[in-house]
Structures are given as C-alpha cells and as structure tokens.
Image (cartoon, rainbow, N blue to C red):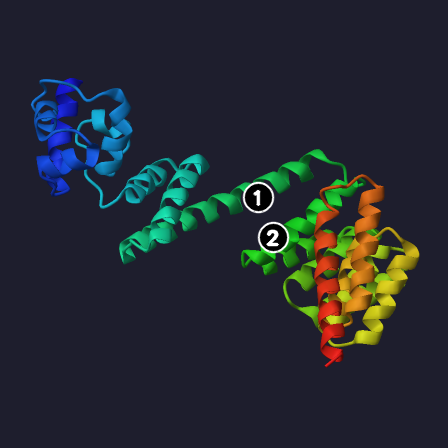
C-alpha cells in the first residue's frame, strides 16, 4: 500500500507540473520530505492527507488506488465519481465544489460543461424518482382518499413540466371514459388541459363539469384561474368567490386572488388576503406555512408605505 501511495504522490505531482519545492511550500513541509514520501522512505502524516489530496485534485482514497489520473481540479474529480455512481450524495459533493470554484471565478468552459452534465444527470434522477413516488402513493391509497386525488393532480402537473402534458391528457381521457360520474375525474381532466397550457379547452371542460357537479369548490378554483388567464376577469372573480362560498377554508383560491390583486397593484386588498391566509395558518398550528403569506403581506405593506410617501411629494 505504501508503495502505491509513493508512486501516486510522484506521478500526481509531475502531472500537475509541480516541482518538489513548490509542493513542499504549499503543504508546509520541506522538499526533502516530499522526496522521502515519493521514494517510499517515510509516509505522510495522516493529518496531511486531506491537504495532499486537495493539492493534487483527488480524493484521499485515490491516493491509495492504482492507476489514478490527475484532474484539472477537485470539482472535476468529484464529477467523475458522481458520473460513475449517480448517487445524490455524490452529486451534492460535486455541486458544492463547483459552486466554490465559480465563486472564485477560476473555472473553464470544460468545468461549466461538466457542471451542466451533473445537473442533467440529477434532473433525470429527480424526474424518475418523483414519478416513482407519485405512483407509489397512487398504488397504496384508495380513490376516496384526498391524498390520492391531490397526487393525481400533482402528477399531471409534473408531466406537463417535463414536456409530457399530452401523455397526461390521454391518460385522463381514458379514465374519464369509464368514470363519467366521478367529479374528481372531471377535475383532473380540467387540470390536465390547464397544466398543458390549453386554457380554452380546459375552460370548456370546466363549464361541462360544473353543470354536472356544481357543488365542488376546487372546480371553481380552476375555473377562476382559467378565466383570469384568458382575460375574463369578472368571471374569474365570480368563480373564485363562489369557491369560497362553498369552502371558506380553501387557501388555493385565496392565493389566486392575492396574486391577482398584486398584479393589479391593489396592494391593500392583496395585503388583507395574505394576512387572512397567514392568520388561518396560525390558528391551525401551521407555523411554518404561515411564514410565506406573512412575507407576501410584508411586501405589500412596503409597497403601500412607498406609495404613501410618493403621494406626499
């Protein structure tokens, strides 16, 4: 083992174009010490191994392996490890090293290329893992369960985000053919077209759905959002308000109204909406969830204060 280490220390140093004197200066030892390591006369202190590995852009384990290659930098070495393992933990290690490199400004186009590839690999992993987990939920929950339907809609959204919206639409069409009397299937049909960016078609499905199932609040949330996207603002407000009449606790519609008020510059209404959501979260013990609407409310308050100051001049 010591023979492999000594050979690696010499080969890595020469491949990195360091003289023994330069390596010694960086590591805080003498050139004679470097020579003794490379001649297998003495071994480096174990506490120096991390610094040696960093200097030669390898891992500590690499120092004791046969046929290890020198890399341009440590980030590239960690990328090579991740490329071989495809483990998320190895991606995180490489990601952190690339981030450090980019912060210093000392990186090449090849570094950026490899960093991009690492994200490409990780994105593929995340897509497959996300779909796997959604399917696991759908296979273990009954269709009467809220979690089941929330997951169905989330999967439709995910499919659209990864460029597979038509797949989601076709799957939902087939399900609706055999479940015409299930309002949740109609909601998913509206959602599938909405997520695919086909707002007009989604609105047509919504209008058919509310004729069959006028008492389902979540349908009116989608209807309001679709009308807003199509510029039908009075209809959007009407659908959102009706959703709240059916279910006053439905935060989804409150978020839709809040963001609409912000777009219109109606900061007071937006502020009141965000505070309402935050206070409801607080009452229900959702202390983490309440932070987001509170931040939105704070932003609106800042806008109102700035507007008030500007009106004084």
The one nearer the camera, 40 or 22, is 22
Q: Label 1 belongs to which residue?
A: 130
Q: Is residue 74 above or below residue 232?
A: above
Quarter of the picture containing the N terminus is top left
- What numbered label is drawn on residue 158? 2
The residue sitting at 13% across, 39% down in the picture is 22
Q: Can the viewer see residue 264?
A: no
Does residue 119 appear left or right of residue 283 in this picture?
A: left
Quarter of the picture containing the C terminus is bottom right
The residue sitting at 8% across, 27% down in the picture is 32
Residue at disc 1, secondary structure: helix
Q: Is residue 229 above or below residue 25?
A: below
> Residue 258's quadrant in the figure?
bottom right
Tag 2–tag 1 contact (CB < 8 Å): yes
Q: Is residue 79 above or below residue 33?
A: below
Q: Position of residue 277 (x, y in %)?
A: 81, 53
Q: Position of residue 98 (x, y in %)?
A: 36, 47
Q: Position of residue 200 (x, y in %)?
A: 72, 72
The one nearer the camera, 172 or 240, is 240
The residue sitting at 29% across, 53% down in the picture is 106
Crowding around mark 2 (Cα neighbors within 10 Å: few <14, some 14 to 19, many 20+) is some
User: Of the residues under marks 2 and 1, which one precedes in the sequence?
Assistant: 1
> Residue 63's quadrant in the figure?
top left
Q: Can the viewer see residue 241?
A: yes
In the displayed image of the protein, which residue is found farthest to the front?
313
Q: Position of residue 289 (x, y in %)?
A: 73, 45
The one nearer the camera, 77 or 222, is 77
Q: Is residue 235 above or below residue 206?
A: below
């Amino acid at each position: 083992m010591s023979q492999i280490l000594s050979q690696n220390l010499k080969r890595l140093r020469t491949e990195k174009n360091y003289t023994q004197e330069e390596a010694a200066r960086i590591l805080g030892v003498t050139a004679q010490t470097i020579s003794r390591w490379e001649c297998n006369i003495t071994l480096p202190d174990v506490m120096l191994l991390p610094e040696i590995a960093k200097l030669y852009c390898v891992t500590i384990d690499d120092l004791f392996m046969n046929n290890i290659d020198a890399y341009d930098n440590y980030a590239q070495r960690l990328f090579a490890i991740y490329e071989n393992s495809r483990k998320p933990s190895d991606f995180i290690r490489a990601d952190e090293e690339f981030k450090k490199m980019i912060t210093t400004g000392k990186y090449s186009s090849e570094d950026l290329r490899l960093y991009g590839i690492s994200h490409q690999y990780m994105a593929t992993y995340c897509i497959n893992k996300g779909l796997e987990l959604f399917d696991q939920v759908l296979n273990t929950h009954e269709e009467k369960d809220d979690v089941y339907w929330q997951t169905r809609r989330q999967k439709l959204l995910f499919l659209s985000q990864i460029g597979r919206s038509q797949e989601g639409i076709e799957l939902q069409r087939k399900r609706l053919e055999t479940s015409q009397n299930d309002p949740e299937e109609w909601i998913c049909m509206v959602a599938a077209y909405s997520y695919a960016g086909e707002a007009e078609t989604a609105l047509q499905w919504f209008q058919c759905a509310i004729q069959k199932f006028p008492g389902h609040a979540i349908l009116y949330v989608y209807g309001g959002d679709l009308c807003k996207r199509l510029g039908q603002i009075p209809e959007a407000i009407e659908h959102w308000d009706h959703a709240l009449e059916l279910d006053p606790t439905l935060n989804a519609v409150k978020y839709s109204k809040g963001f609409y008020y912000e777009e219109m510059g109606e900061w007071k209404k937006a502020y009141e909406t965000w505070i309402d959501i935050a206070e409801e979260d607080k009452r229900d013990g959702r202390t983490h969830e309440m932070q987001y609407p509170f931040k939105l409310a704070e932003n609106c308050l800042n806008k109102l204060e700035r507007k008030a100051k500007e009106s004084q001049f």
